[in-house]
Structures are given as structure tokens and as C-alpha cells.
Image (spheres, rainbow, N blue to C red):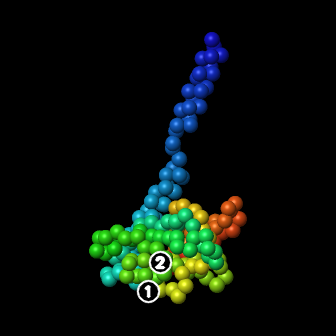
């Protein structure tokens, strides 16, 4: 009986210690992340596709199921797409649809070294060609006032990584 009570007491102590969520370092990290995300969401970004674009705000970035480069697997798929709250209060989705700014799409391009995809709302001659990306949501990290980047694996199993860079337009 004493063994049973002792084991139950140990289980209760262990359960209580597991439920204790008192990690000030983690809380501070979460608060910093929240503030950073808030600062990013509230930052002024310029987009060629809108009228009063200084007030436009990026609220998310996703990749669709596949993006093809030099490949016929997904020649008509959406690629990178992003949700933006425009200064008019309208939320729009923009993606790389061959630079068709009249339908509120942005563009992305690949650098010569094939290390990075650049995403902004400038008109590029070539949308990103040469890659096939299969993934879901990616996170955006703010590095400087003028640029953002994130990395995403582009094959499975993940051995190759490509950076996705976001540049504030002038």
C-alpha cells in the first residue's frame, strides 16, 4: 500500500512539474517575436501595383503545391502568393502570374546563381523559372529595414535549400 501511495505521489509531482509553464526566457522570446511580427505587419511597403501603395501591408506569404522550373510538371500552377491589405482597405492575393499587375499580381524572379528567389512587386522579364518547390506555409523573418528573407527546402528528402528574399521597393 505504501508503494502505491508513493508511486501515486511521484506521478502527481511529475505531472505538476510538467504542467508548470514558467519559462521567462521563452515568454520573452515569444513577446519579441510578437512585437517583431507586429512591426513587420505595420511597416510601410511600396508596391507598383497599387495607387497609394505606401500604406499597403503584407500579412502573409505562402507557396502553392508546386512551382516548376525547366519542367512541365506544373507549368500553370500558382507560385508564390501573398496577401496584402491595400490602403483602400481591400485585402488582395497577388502571385506570379506573368507580371499582370492589372489583376493585382506581383512577380518573383531567380538570381543568376540560382540561390535565391526574389519577391517584390517590380516588373521582371522572367518569372522564376528553373525550380520546382513543394511545400506549405513559410515564415518571414525581418532582417533589416529594407529586406526580408527566409529559406525553404526545395526537394525531398530536404537536401537543397533556397533563400527567398523580399526587397522593399523604392
Question: Residue 161: in sight, yes or no?
Answer: yes
Hey, which residue is sitting farthest bottom in the picture?
A: 125
Image coordinates of residue 100 in percent, x first then y, are 43, 82
Q: Nearer the viewer, residue 18 or 137?
A: 137
Q: How many marks?
A: 2
How many angstroms separate mark 1 from mark 2 (CA)?
22 Å
Residue 26 placement (x, y as % from top left)? 53, 52
Q: Residues within 10 Å of mark 2 (few under 14, many from 20)?
A: many
- The label on residue 97 is 2
Q: Residue at x 57, y 62 (%)?
A: 135
- The x, y position of residue 16, in whole percent, is 54, 32
Q: Quadrant of the N terminus?
A: top right
Relative to the observer, which residue lies in front, 42 or 120?
120
Question: The residue tagged with tag 1: helix, strand or loop?
Answer: loop
Badge 1 local density, few (<14 within 10 Å), some, or many (20+)? Answer: few
**Residue at the disc numbered 1:** 170
Report which quarter residue 92 is drawn in: bottom left
Viewer-nearest of discs 1 and 2: 2
Quarter placement of the C terminus: bottom left
Where 98 sits versus 136, above or below? below
Q: Residue at x 45, y 70 (%)?
A: 82
Residue visible at 64% across and 67% down in the picture: 154
Front residue of 10 and 156? 156
Q: Is residue 62 above or below residue 122?
A: above
Expressed as whole percent of the image width and height from the top left, the position of residue 73 reads: 61, 70
Amino acid at each position: 500500500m505504501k508503494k502505491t501511495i508513493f508511486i501515486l505521489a511521484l506521478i502527481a509531482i511529475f505531472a505538476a512539474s510538467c504542467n508548470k509553464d514558467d519559462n521567462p526566457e521563452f515568454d520573452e522570446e515569444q513577446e519579441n517575436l510578437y512585437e517583431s511580427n507586429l512591426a513587420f505587419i505595420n511597416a510601410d511597403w511600396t508596391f507598383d501595383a497599387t495607387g497609394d501603395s505606401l500604406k499597403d501591408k503584407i500579412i502573409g506569404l505562402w507557396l502553392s503545391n508546386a512551382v516548376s522550373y525547366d519542367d512541365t510538371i506544373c507549368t500553370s500552377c500558382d507560385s508564390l502568393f501573398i496577401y496584402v491589405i491595400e490602403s483602400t482597405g481591400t485585402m488582395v492575393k497577388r502571385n506570379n502570374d506573368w507580371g499582370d499587375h492589372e489583376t493585382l499580381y506581383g512577380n518573383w524572379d531567380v538570381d543568376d546563381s540560382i540561390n535565391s528567389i526574389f519577391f517584390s512587386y517590380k516588373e521582371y522579364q522572367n518569372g522564376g523559372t528553373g525550380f520546382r518547390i513543394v511545400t506549405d506555409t513559410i515564415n518571414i523573418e525581418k532582417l533589416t529595414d529594407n529586406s526580408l528573407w527566409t529559406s525553404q527546402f526545395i526537394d525531398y528528402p530536404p537536401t537543397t535549400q533556397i533563400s527567398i528574399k523580399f526587397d522593399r521597393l523604392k
